Image: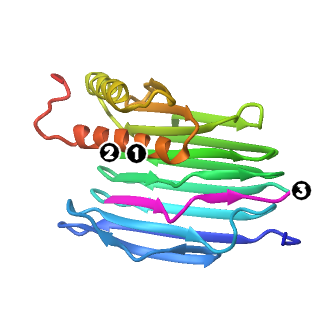
């Protein structure tokens, strides 16, 4: 049954570091947004699993996610399951605002968005980074029938300077198979460290990517790695991209590597 008007949801999250581990200080869920309790990771990070009530994004829905990660804190965000974009008529929208303080770390690993017949969906994510803050992101979009369009925008800024802007405008003609995107960036990353991470990503792609997944790997202006993947299986693409990003994060965190000499 299609609803006559759009629903709303808002989730506000804030985390800090208490000197030993990451603590979730704020967790506020309104409307159809939901979030798990924090799970402690072995390295002192906190992990949260988000979800929403209802069948997915339906026409005219509006959802907002606000995330603030304090100095030295590390947060991992996952979604509970794949999310559907449904309905004809209006455009559903998801907006995400992320602020990372000095030395903060955030990894957002979403389950796939699946676009169904007639759906029109728009997603925008705005990220601000303080010094040495790192941001990692994995996202997949899969077609399911004759959807209308899906548009996504990711903007990363340091202060007032935009250092990464990535936009996809997808129609059925452009989204014939699953497309996945992954990013790993850190403020103040050296050119040498960025080149080393790019080499790691290239090696992982050659080693792990099956023949039916096409990969494109690059470096944004800020340094770090961007990966675009295309193939028939959303789960396989997400798993591959997540593994690559996890390896890049672990490599970049190694204290024995000098930015000048990697």
> CA separation, marks 3 and 1?
34 Å
> CA separation, marks 2 and 3?
39 Å
Which portion, as a residue range, is magenta?
74-89
Q: Nearer the viewer, residue 97 or 256?
A: 256
> CA separation, marks 2 and 1?
6 Å
Label 1: few (<14), some (14–19) or many (≥20) C-alpha neighbours in 10 Å: many
Check residue 76 for magenta coloring.
yes
Pointers 2 and 3 in contact (C-beta within 8 Å): no
Residue 134 x %, y %: 35, 45
**Which label is found at residue 89?**
3
Q: Which residue is mark 1?
A: 242
- Horizontal side of residue 33 vs 163, given as left or right: right
Residue that sits furthest to the left in the current view: 256
Residue name at image x 57 percent, y 42 percent: 154
Q: Nearer the viewer, residue 163 or 34?
A: 34
Pointers 3 and 1 in contact (C-beta within 8 Å): no
Q: Is residue 243 visible?
A: yes
Q: Earlier in the sequence, mark 2 or mark 3?
A: 3
Label 3: few (<14), some (14–19) or many (≥20) C-alpha neighbours in 10 Å: few
Residue name at image x 18 percent, y 24 percent: 262
**Which label is found at residue 191?**
none
Check residue 180 for magenta coloring.
no
Residue name at image x 75 percent, y 64 percent: 61
Q: Which corner quadrant of the image does residue 209 belong to?
A: top left
Residue 142 x %, y %: 64, 45
Q: Earlier in the sequence, mark 3 or mark 1?
A: 3
Residue 240 x %, y %: 41, 40
Residue name at image x 39 percent, y 52 percent: 107
Q: Which residue is mark 2?
A: 246
Q: Secondary structure at mark 1?
A: helix
Q: Secondary structure at mark 3?
A: loop
């Amino acid at each position: 049954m299609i609803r006559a008007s759009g629903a709303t949801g808002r989730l506000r999250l804030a985390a800090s570091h208490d000197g030993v581990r990451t603590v979730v200080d704020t967790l506020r869920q309104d409307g159809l947004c939901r979030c798990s309790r924090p799970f402690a990771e072995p390295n002192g990070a906190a992990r949260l699993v988000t979800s929403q009530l209802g069948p997915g994004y339906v026409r005219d829905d509006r959802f907002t996610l606000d995330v603030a990660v304090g100095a030295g804190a590390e947060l991992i965000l996952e979604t509970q399951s794949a999310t559907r974009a449904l309905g004809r008529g209006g455009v559903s929208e998801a907006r995400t605002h992320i602020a990372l303080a000095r030395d903060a770390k955030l990894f957002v690993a979403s389950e796939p968005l699946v676009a169904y017949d007639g759906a029109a969906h728009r997603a925008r994510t705005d990220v601000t980074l303080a010094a040495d803050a790192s941001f990692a992101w994995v996202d997949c979009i899969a077609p399911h029938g004759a959807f209308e369009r899906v548009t996504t925008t990711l903007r990363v800024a340091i202060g007032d300077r935009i250092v990464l802007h990535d936009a996809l405008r997808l129609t059925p003609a452009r989204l014939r198979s699953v497309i996945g995107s992954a990013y790993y960036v850190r403020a103040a990353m050296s050119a040498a460290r960025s080149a080393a991470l790019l080499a790691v990503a290239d090696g992982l792609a050659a080693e792990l990517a099956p023949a039916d997944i096409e990969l494109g790997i690059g470096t944004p202006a800020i340094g770090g790695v961007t990966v675009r993947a295309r193939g028939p299986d959303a789960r396989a693409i997400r798993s591959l991209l997540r593994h690559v990003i996890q390896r890049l994060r672990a490599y970049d965190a190694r204290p024995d590597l000098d930015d000048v000499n990697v």
